[in-house]
Structures are given as C-alpha cells and as structure tokens.
C-alpha cells in the first residue's frame, strides 16, 4: 500500500494541473477565433450601439457615391413596448404610446379650422350673389373674389359662367337658393369623382411604399409623422424611413413621431449620409418585417435646383430595385398660393406625383388653391392639414370641404 501512495499522489497532481489548463486553453481558442472573424454571439462588442438598433449592411446596387455608414433600425422590430425611450432623453423621459384619433369624419370634426378660408370663398360669394341686383359689376366682383382665393383663371371662368347661366334661368335671389347653386358648382369644381384613397395595401410579399416630397419648410417630416398616426388608426403596421439626412434634427424628429404610436424608424446617425441608401434599407427592412406600409421622408429641396431634384429621382429608382413605389405625396403649404403650383409641376415631372397633401389650410383665406392644383396637375388633393395638433391631418372630402367653406 505504501508503494502505491506515491503513484496515486502523482495521478491526482496531474489531474489538477490539466484541469487548470482547460479554461486557459478555451479562452485562448475563443480569443483566436474572435480575431479570425468568428464572433461570439454573447460578445458585448457585437451588440447594437447605445441608443438601440441594429447596424445594417450596405445595400447592393447603390450608386458608388455613398460615403456614410449604413443606417440603423430603431427599434429592431415593430414589437415595441408600451413605453419607449427616445435617444435624446438619456433615459430620463418615457414616451407613452398613444392611440390616434379615428380617421373617419375627421374633416367634419375640424370644420371650424376652415373659418379663414370661409371668409372669401363662402361669405364673400354669398353676399355678392344674394344682392338685389346682379349686374355685370357684381359678376366682375365675383370673378375677382375667386381669383383672390387662388382658384385659378380657368376654374374661375368655369364657375362664373355656370353660375351666370343658372341664375339667369332660375331668376333666383334668395340666399338659400344662391347658396344651393354655389354649393353644387363648387363641388363640381373640387371634383368628388377623383380617387383620393391612399395606396396603402400590401401587394403579395411587398408592403405598400410611399415617398413624401416637397420644398423646404412645408412641414414634410411633421406630415409623415401625422400620416403615420392616420395609418395606425386604420390598423396598419407602418415602418418609417428617415431619408432626410441633411437636416440633423429630421431623423430624430421623425423617430419621436413614430415612437409616440409604436412605429419603428430606419435612419442613419451620420449627417449627409446617402438618402437613397437609407430609403433602400427602410424598404428592405419593411419587406423582411412584413409591415403593411413603408413611408420615406425626404429632404426639402427647391424645385429649381437640378442636382437636388436628380437626387430625389435617384431615391425613387433605388427603392424600385426592391419594390414598386405605390404613392408619391407632394406636401404643399396652402399659404404659398400660386407659387405652390410651380413647385407641384416640377416635382410631378421628376417623380410622378400621385397625390397632394395641403398643409396650413386653416391659416389661409385662399382655399381655392385646392381646385387650382387639381386642375393644373390632374392629381387629387388627398389630405389636408388644419392645425398644429398631432391628429389635425384629415383625408380630403370634396363635399365636406365645400360645406365647411359655405358654413
């Protein structure tokens, strides 16, 4: 037995030494594998950066002028919690996920906001047409009133000719009869037969793709945020793409709008990143996540800047490598009047506008711009902005709009 004791002790010592070496060898192997390019799934160095998100690879087929890192999806999927922390809140402020107001009947609920537009088109015309004597001077004033309301020359002449003929035939003077005639002719001009529905239905494996464009300062990012609320109120799964990469606050602003209704935003944290790349990644993520609608916010650009307009065309072409663009909405400021027509024509030539969003309609006495734009482009006004509130964007309804003008 005494002879076996040294042998047993030697075996135990060997086991202890080997056991101590195993963790060292495993650690060395892991380190070697990491540097060789095999990442450990639990390695914190591979996790998303602070602020949330997942780094996306560069998209294939993008023009070679891209210099910025890939965009970030925030959050990584659409299953956001009840509350979310915006990047600039540093963990101190929580954004409560809100329930947007119902879309149906929204324009009627916002009727009082059209009081300024009502002042010219409604009260002015009714006062003129209800006078005891309707002579050439009255018709000249009616024509001038309509032109001041930005109705446009051709629609103005069309409306005046129709009213003159009907007043002459019916010989009416009562305010009620005149109002009825005016309502009928205005509704014809606004044209309720135009298709004002948004193309937001999935097509097979692809979500509906929407691009929002316009000049600087018309409120595109805010409009995209409000429109996201409209779609969420209609039970759509939405993904936002912050392709306005030149204005530092634009992506943050859009992400905050999205967080308020539980909608994710694809964006780049690098100012000046290629907008087409961000748009591509947004559509790619939307396809992978099987959302209903991907909305792309673009940078404001002057319609007479050829380079910027070419860049906008590029954004659309790059998106179409993945999916067809279903809706291109042009955001116009109603207070700019006829200048908005010039903007609309150029944008329509570059990206084939499918609908108009008319903002600040509550802040102008020129509601006739609705008719002028539709006549000039053959494109319907689909949405109108009637205030600063988050749910003050309403689907445009021809009859409700005319009734609001005539009160």
Image (cartoon, rainbow, N blue to C red):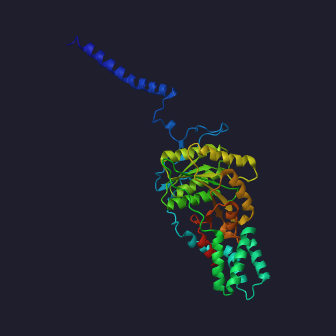
The answer to whether residue 338 is above or below residue 45 is below
37 left or right of 271 in image: left
Tell which residue pokes out farthest to the bottom in this image.
Answer: 132
The answer to whether residue 200 is above or below residue 274 is below
Q: Residue 162's x, y, as percent?
A: 70, 76
Q: Residue 251's x, y, as percent?
A: 61, 51
Front position in the image: 26 or 99: 99
Q: Residue 177's x, y, as percent?
A: 64, 84
262 left or right of 401 in image: left
- Residue 398: image quadrant is bottom right
Tell which residue pokes out farthest to the front in this image.
Answer: 169
Name the quadrant of the N terminus.
top left
Residue at the image point whose x is 66% and y is 36% from the top:
64
Q: How many marks?
A: 0
The answer to whether residue 46 is above or below residue 353 is above
Tell which residue pokes out farthest to the left in this image.
Answer: 1
Q: Is residue 241 visible?
A: yes
- Residue 397: image quadrant is bottom right
Tell which residue pokes out farthest to the top in this image.
Answer: 3
Front position in the image: 79 or 155: 155
Q: Residue 395's x, y, as percent?
A: 58, 65
Q: Is residue 51 visible?
A: no
218 left or right of 320 in image: right
Name the quadrant of the C terminus.
bottom right
- Residue 380: image quadrant is bottom right
Residue at the image point whose x is 68% and y is 56% from the top:
214
Front position in the image: 281 or 398: 398
């Amino acid at each position: 037995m005494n002879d076996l004791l040294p042998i047993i002790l030697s075996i135990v010592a060997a086991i202890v030494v080997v056991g101590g070496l195993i963790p060292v060898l495993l650690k060395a192997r892991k380190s070697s594998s990491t540097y060789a390019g095999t990442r450990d799934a639990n390695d914190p160095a591979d996790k998303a950066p602070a602020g949330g998100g997942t780094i996306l690879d560069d998209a294939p087929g993008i023009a070679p002028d891209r210099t910025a890192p890939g965009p970030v999806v925030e959050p990584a999927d659409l299953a956001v919690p009840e509350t979310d922390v915006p990047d600039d809140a540093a963990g101190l402020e929580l954004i409560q996920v809100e329930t947007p107001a119902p879309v149906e009947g929204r324009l009627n609920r916002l009727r009082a906001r059209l009081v300024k537009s009502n002042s010219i088109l409604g009260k002015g015309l009714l006062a003129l047409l209800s006078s005891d004597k309707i002579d050439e001077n009255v018709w000249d004033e009616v024509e001038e009133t309509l032109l001041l309301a930005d109705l446009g020359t051709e629609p103005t002449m069309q409306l005046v000719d129709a009213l003159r003929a009907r007043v002459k035939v019916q010989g009416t003077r009562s305010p009620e009869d005149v109002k009825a005639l005016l309502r009928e002719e205005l509704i014809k001009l606004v044209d309720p037969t135009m298709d004002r529905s948004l193309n937001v239905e999935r097509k097979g494996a692809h979500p509906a793709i929407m691009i929002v464009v316009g000049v600087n300062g018309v409120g595109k990012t805010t409009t995209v945020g409000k429109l996201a609320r409209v779609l969420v109120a209609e039970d759509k799964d939405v993904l936002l793409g912050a392709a306005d990469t030149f204005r530092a606050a634009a992506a943050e602003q859009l992400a905050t709008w999205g967080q308020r209704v539980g909608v994710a935003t694809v964006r780049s944290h690098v100012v000046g990143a290629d907008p087409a790349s961000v748009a591509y990644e947004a559509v790619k993520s939307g396809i992978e996540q099987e959302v209903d609608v991907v909305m792309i916010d673009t940078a404001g650009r002057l319609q007479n800047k050829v380079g910027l307009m070419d860049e906008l065309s590029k954004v659309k072409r790059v998106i179409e490598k993945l999916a067809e663009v279903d809706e291109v909405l042009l955001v116009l400021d109603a207070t700019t009047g006829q200048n908005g027509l010039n903007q609309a024509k150029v944008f329509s030539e570059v990206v084939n506008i499918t609908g108009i969003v008319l903002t600040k309609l509550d802040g102008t006495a020129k509601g006739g711009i609705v008719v002028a734009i539709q006549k000039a482009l053959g494109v319907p006004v689909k949405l109108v902005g009637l205030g600063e509130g988050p749910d003050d964007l309403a689907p445009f309804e021809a009859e409700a709009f005319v009734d609001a003008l005539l009160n």
